[in-house]
Each structure stands twice: as structure tokens, then as C-alpha cells.
Amino acid sequence: MKRYLWIMVILALAGAVIGYRELSSGIRKKPQARTGVTREIPVKLAPVTRGPIAYVLSTSGDVLPLMQVDVVSRVSGYVERIHFEIGDRVAVGQVVAAVDPKELRHRVEEDEAALKVAEATLREKETQLLHTEKQVERARLLRQKDFISSQELDEAETRAQTARAQKELAQAQLAQKGASLAQSRYQLALTRVVAPFSGVVIRRLVDPGAYVSSSTPILTLAVPDPLKVVVNIPEKDVNLARVGMSAKLEVDAFAGRVFDGRIARLNSALDPTSRTLMAEIHVPNGQLLLKPGMFARVALVLGEQKDSLLVPAEAVVEEDGKDFLYTVADGKAVRRGVSRGWSQNSLVAIGKGIEEGEKIVVAGQQRLKPGMKVRVLEEKGSQ
């Protein structure tokens, strides 16, 4: 009986070992069976379209007056009057301030008196010269008749030469006094400070009674319309930039509003530090909405193509520095090498490698490899 019991125990243990091995083998085989199932990648498709596209350089810059200058007095003195306040419009040549003219007016009066004295002196010397010249003529006649000696003739000619020199000196003194008077009159005129161009007063820097010199700013004048924005164009885009090209500007003060401008000037050389070319954009500002000092975001249109093959930007996949698109053929992914062009508003122009109307993968392409099975979902843009 005991022998039979031991045989049953041994058979039970053997069955348990065999069952464990079979179970372990089955567990290991199940993943192998699953890996044999081909996985499909869900994707969405969209057609290649044709249309216009522009190459837009996005940059920024400060809004600045077209012209701005500190108006200074060209003579020293005390400010007598200032005729304008901040925000006032000023016309070119209009008097904006006046420096006390009393000292310069007194100088003009002195120079006018000195000029009159010089004129009288010249008239006197001219009279003397005329008299001595007549004496020389008379002496020559007398010497021909031997009524006077050669020495007396020489003395008459010497007096005439002296009178002529005195007249020339008086003429020079008269010219000097005239120049002095002209200079003092010019200095007097400069006590009236005039606007060098038409604009708006944006700063007033002194008050009446202040002493100013030729380097002291009195007020700042700026041209508010048009304004300008200076931007830098990268070296790679320099060959595209031309005077007259359009630009779009946006500022935070007028969210959603676009201001139009154009390239008015281009520098003739690149900045050696930044390798950029300075461009000056002029922006009409007839309503005076834009203010100097605002920060502007600038979209500079450097080129336009009226007829290009267009695909969504997200459809283009870059690998190892090359660009690809995916299409679907017989339920499998097909990779197509393409030539990428300009980008605008989430669209990319394709130069070659695809045709108009072809369906390309626009969602799920990042998970694809050539030959993978795909499952096409509802096409992008379909109803």
C-alpha cells in the first residue's frame, strides 16, 4: 500500500513539472504571435493646390520721425519769447523763439555810424586826390615851359601818389566797416529763431529768460507724417530687397490694424558686425495715429510668385537636411523628395517633386517610414 502511494506522488510531481513547462512555453509564444500582426498608421490626406505666395521677412523696429532736430539759437543771449508749445504745428521759416536783441541792435547802430564816418573819409580823400592830380598836370605844363624845376614836379607827383594811397586806404576801411555792419545786421536777424522745416513741436527745453548759447537747444521739431521705421535685412535676403517694396506694420496701440509702408532707402553696404543691410521704411501717417517711439512689428514683402504649388507647412518632413512629403499608394506610405520654396500663412511652396492635385499626408506623417501600411482618415478640409 505504501509503495502504491509513493508511485502516485511521483506521478503527480511529474505531471506538475510537465504542465509548468507547457504553460511557460505558451506564454513565450503569445508575443511572437502578436508581432506577426501588421500595424496600420492612421493618417489624413489633403490635395496639393496651386496659387500665389509671397516671401515675407518678419522683423521689427522703432517708429521714428522722418526728420527731427533740436532748434537752437545761433547767437548767445537771453530768451525773450517762445511762440510755440508742445504739440503745436510750425511752418518752415516761421519764428519759433526770439533772443533779446538789444545788445546786437546797439552794435548795428555803432557799425552804421562807423560806416558813415568811413564814407565821409573816403569822399575827403577822393577830393584830395583830385586836387593833387590837377596840381601834377599843372606842374608838368610848367616844367615843359621851364617855369619850375624838376624837383618841384617830383614833389607834386609824390603828393598825388600819397593822396592816391590814402584814398585806397579809405576805400579798404569803408569796405571793412561795411562788412562789419553786414555781420552785425546778420547777427541781429539771428535773434529771431526760425523753423528749418515744417513739423510739430515735440519738446520745449527752455523758458523765456533763460540764457542760451549757440549750442543750447530751445525746442525739438519733428515731422509726424510720414514716419519711418529702420529695419535690418539679413545677408541672405539682401539680393531680394528693392526700393519701393511694400511693408506691413502693426503696433500694440492698434491691435489688429495694419499700416502700409514702403522701402524708401537702402544702405549701400552691410553692417560688418551683424551682416545685415539697413532699410528705411516710410509709413504715411495722415491721421497721426502712429507716434514716434512706438515699437512696430514689420512684415516686409521681399518677393511674390503668382503661380506656385502649395502644401501645408506641417506636411513637409525634414530628415538629414532633406525635405520629404508622404503620399499613399496601395494602402502604403510612399516618401517623395521635394524642393521647398517660400513659406507664408502656414503654406509652403514646392518647387519640384510633386504635382497639383496629388493627395499628400498632412497628419500622421511624423510616424511614417516608406512602405508602412496606413489607414486613411477623413481628408483634411472635407465636409
Image (cartoon, rainbow, N blue to C red):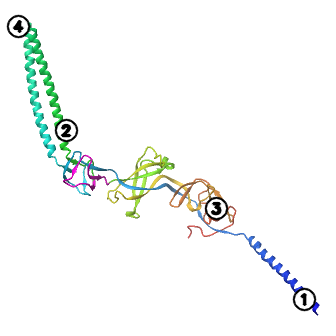
User: What residue is shown with label 2?
Assistant: 183
Kind of residue indicated by mark 3: Thr
Q: Is residue 376 left or right of residue 32?
A: left
Q: CA distance from mark 3 to mark 2?
A: 86 Å
Would you call the spot at circle 4 few (<14 residues within 10 Å), some (14-19), or many (20 or more)?
few
Q: Please state which of residues 52 and 188 is positioned toward the viewer in this rendering.
A: 188
Q: Mark 1 or mark 4, which is nearer the start of the sequence?
A: 1
Q: Is residue 141 left or right of residue 351?
A: left
Question: What is the residue that sits farthest to the bottom in this orientation?
Answer: 1
Q: CA distance from mark 4 to mark 3?
A: 132 Å
User: What residue is shown with label 1?
Assistant: 8
Q: Position of residue 83 (x, y in %)?
A: 20, 54
Q: Mark 3 or mark 4, which is nearer the start of the sequence?
A: 4
Stretch of the chain drawn in magenta: 200-224
Q: CA distance from mark 4 to mark 2?
A: 54 Å
Q: Position of residue 128 (x, y in %)?
A: 8, 22
Q: Is residue 201 left or right of residue 343?
A: left
Q: Position of residue 338 (x, y in %)?
A: 61, 55
Point out the image quarter for the C terminus: bottom right
User: What residue is shown with label 3?
Assistant: 327
Q: Position of residue 17 (x, y in %)?
A: 85, 81
Kind of residue indicated by mark 1: Met
Residues tagged 1 and 2 counted as in contact (Cβ below 8 A): no
Does the magenta-highlighted stretch encompass residue 216?
yes
Would you call the spot at circle 3 few (<14 residues within 10 Å), some (14-19), or many (20 or more)?
many
Q: Mark 2 or mark 3, which is nearer the start of the sequence?
A: 2
Q: Is residue 275 left or right of residue 203?
A: right
Q: Mark 2 or mark 4, which is nearer the start of the sequence?
A: 4
Q: CA distance from mark 3 to mark 1?
A: 68 Å
